[in-house]
Image (cartoon, rainbow, N blue to C red):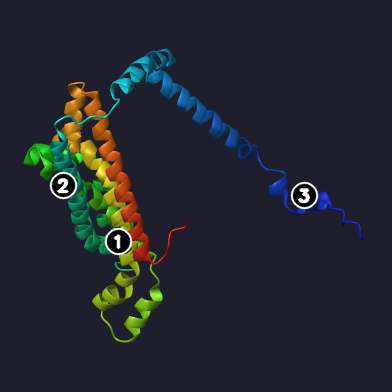
Amino acid sequence: MTRPQEIDTAALRARYPGVFDRPASARLAMPAMIVAAFAIVVYGLVDLDFSPARLFAGLSQLGWISLMMIPPDPGSSLPIYLKALGETLSIAVLGTTLAAVFALPVSLLAARNVVPSKLLRFPVRRLLDSIRGVDTLIWALVWINVVGLGPFAGVLAIAVSDFGAFGKLFSEAIEGADQKQVEGIRASGGSALHEIRFGLLPQVLPVIAGQVLYFIESNTRSATIIGIVGAGGIGLQLAEQIRVLEWQKVSFLILMILVAVAAIDFVSGKLRFAIIGRRPVA
């Protein structure tokens, strides 16, 4: 067996001085970031009046509430709760669908490979950022004051909020599409609309469909939250039962929401894999 060749450390140090003799700023950067992050966490805990004593004292109250939730019991309100759950699902589906329909053409204007001019693309992207920067709950409060209480405000809140998110996601999917198909259509004499219709959209529609299905699942939870502030659905029923301390009904409503979200997750997962053309890993 041959002996391993001895490493000439001096030669390597002379050849790569930046690796062996890193400046002090580079060596201290990571420890400084860790210390700064720790200091920010400690300051945040102190500033927000975090108290372990209050936390442990509240655990007994949490245990009492958990015991009061057993067993879940809808009482005589099951038909009302089923109708409210259907309303929540309708808010999620309709709001997500409206957002996707309106976001698709706008996302084309935000994609670099469709609109090369930055002057035209920049305001569209900033508009999407501005809309996406406002949470769904805030949009719900705005639309409740515009159109009044009820599920219509919830649909508008989800539609506007997801419009900004879909615009960004769809534009990124369009920018990531393979340009060979577009170039082939262009070489055969196709117009710009033909390039989009037959070159880009067939590639990105499966991805877009998967994103829309995922958002329907996510928006089922969002529709529950915005229902608490008056946008209808099962969230309104949940808020009312918490307010009157009907904990058995609260636990039943929570179970209904969990079952609905799990069912939507299962169905949307199957549909996503069917659309993309792959099978889920067992």
Q: Is residue 232 visible?
A: no
At x 32%, y 21%, the residue is 67
Q: Which is nearer the N-term, disc 2 or disc 1? A: 2
Q: Quadrant of residue 260?
A: top left
- At label 3, counting other C-alpha atoms closer than 10 Å, the crowd grade (few under 14, some 14-19, many 20 or more) is few
Q: In front here: 194 or 35?
A: 194
Say whether marks 1 and 3 touch (CB < 8 Å): no
Q: x, y (%) of residue 5?
A: 87, 57
Amino acid at the residue labelled 1? Ala
Please say if 57 is above or below 281. above
Residue at image mark 3: 13
Q: SS of the residue at dot 1?
A: helix
Residue at image mark 2: 155
Disc assigned to residue 209: 1
Q: x, y (%) of residue 7?
A: 84, 53
Q: SS of the residue at dot 2?
A: helix
- At label 2, counting other C-alpha atoms closer than 10 Å, the crowd grade (few under 14, some 14-19, many 20 or more) is many
Q: Quadrant of residue 26?
A: top right
Mark 2 and mark 1: Cα distance apart in space: 19 Å
Q: x, y (%) of residue 146?
A: 8, 40
Mark 2 and mark 3: Cα distance apart in space: 64 Å
Q: Which is nearer the N-term, disc 1 or disc 3? A: 3
